[in-house]
């Protein structure tokens, strides 16, 4: 069977295009900005694929980028020959097939190197600084200080508000820690010993990680940063492993016979 070839290219107003409600592909603000930069640099080289009713089949990210650039019209190819089942399948296939491609790392390094030598902005092509350096030096071992036992391919959790910002006193229970502090204060110990025991007493503070996550969603940027640095919330898994939070927990679990942590203490992973 001969594949269908589109007959013409249409230029349609953005407002006429209808996003597919069940599109399973997501586009972050950062990626949309990258697509917009690519369109600004290279032009609108990849048309939007639409059905007979102007519904978007492929190109949702490009439409968002076009809106960001303030474009009024975009080039479109109408795929009127597809059945409803084929349209649903192609929405997924268009994205998944592209993900299945790989790189010749040596040739990629050569091309990127030549582009950087003439001052071309490699970020326009979708690479961040870390990816660029890794691509330019494919034979160099990774030296981020992490054990090979840990994968770098992790999905960071997304924290979104679910309700009102909880008060600070609901984020933790200090009752047992306060009892120990009172006992230490009454014992009239040497300052150095008292300080040591008070530091240990703080470990008996019980954190409510569900409410901590909600508090994090409503907090200002500086507070969020300090919460991440304290491992109350983990966004950057690589940073958490470098600081020893994740690895330390695994070692403790091993020492206790790989006992499963309870739900509260595991809620921030």
Image: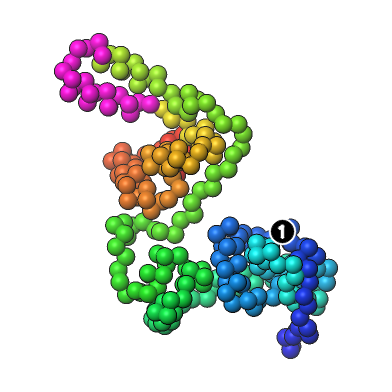
Left or right: where 73 falls relative to 156: right
Looking at the image, is 237 positioned above or below residue 186?
below
Looking at the image, is 171 positioned above or below residue 181?
below
Q: Residues within 10 Å of mark 1 (few under 14, many from 20)?
A: few
Looking at the image, is 71 positioned above or below residue 203?
below
- Please tell me in which quadrant of the rendered image residue 32 appears: bottom right
- Closest to the observer, 50 or 224: 224
Q: Which residue is pictured at 47% across the width and 72% down the height?
A: 121
Left or right: where 185 falls relative to 110: left
Q: Quadrant of the C terminus?
A: top left
Looking at the image, the residue that sits furthest to the right is 53
Q: State the residue position of label 1.
A: 22
Q: Which residue is pictured at 43% across the width and 76% down the height?
A: 119
- Closest to the observer, 142 or 33: 33
Which SS does the magenta portion mostly show? helix
Q: Is residue 73 visible?
A: yes
The number of numbered discs placed on residues in the rendered structure image is 1
Question: Residue 83: percent from the left, percent from the top?
Answer: 80, 72
Question: Residue 61: percent from the left, percent from the top?
Answer: 64, 65
Q: Which residue is pictured at 40% across the width and 64% down the height?
A: 130
Q: Find numbered disc 1 in the image and state the secondary structure of the residue it sits on.
A: loop
Question: Residue 197: percent from the left, percent from the top?
Answer: 24, 23
On whether residue 131 falls in the magenta region, the answer is: no
- Closest to the observer, 16 or 43: 43
Question: Residue 234: percent from the left, percent from the top?
Answer: 44, 45
**Residues rendered magenta in the picture:** 185-205
- Please tell me in which quadrant of the rendered image residue 136 appears: bottom left
Looking at the image, the residue that sits furthest to the bottom is 2
């Amino acid at each position: 069977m001969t594949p269908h070839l589109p007959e013409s290219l249409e230029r349609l107003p953005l407002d006429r295009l209808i996003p597919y409600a069940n599109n399973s592909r997501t586009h972050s603000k950062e990626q949309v900005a990258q697509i917009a930069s690519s369109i600004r640099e290279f032009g609108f080289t990849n048309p939007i694929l639409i059905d007979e009713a102007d519904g978007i089949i492929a190109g949702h990210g490009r439409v968002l980028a076009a809106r960001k650039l303030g474009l009024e019209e975009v080039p479109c190819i109408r795929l009127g020959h597809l059945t409803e089942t084929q349209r649903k399948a192609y929405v997924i296939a268009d994205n998944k097939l592209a993900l299945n491609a790989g790189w010749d790392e040596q040739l990629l390094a050569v091309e990127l190197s030549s582009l950087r030598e003439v001052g071309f902005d490699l970020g326009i092509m979708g690479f961040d600084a870390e990816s660029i350096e890794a691509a330019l030096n494919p034979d160099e071992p990774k030296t981020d200080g992490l054990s090979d036992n840990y994968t770098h391919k992790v999905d960071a959790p997304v924290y979104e508000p679910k309700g009102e910002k909880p008060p600070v006193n609901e984020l933790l229970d200090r009752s047992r820690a306060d009892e120990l502090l009172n006992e230490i204060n009454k014992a009239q110990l040497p300052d150095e010993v008292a300080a040591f025991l008070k530091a240990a007493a703080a470990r008996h503070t019980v954190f409510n990680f569900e409410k901590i996550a909600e508090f994090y969603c409503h907090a200002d940027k500086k507070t969020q940063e300090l919460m991440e640095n304290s491992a109350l919330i983990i966004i950057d898994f690589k940073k958490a492993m470098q600081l020893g939070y994740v690895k330390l927990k695994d070692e403790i679990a091993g020492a206790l016979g790989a006992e499963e942590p309870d739900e509260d203490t595991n809620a921030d992973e």
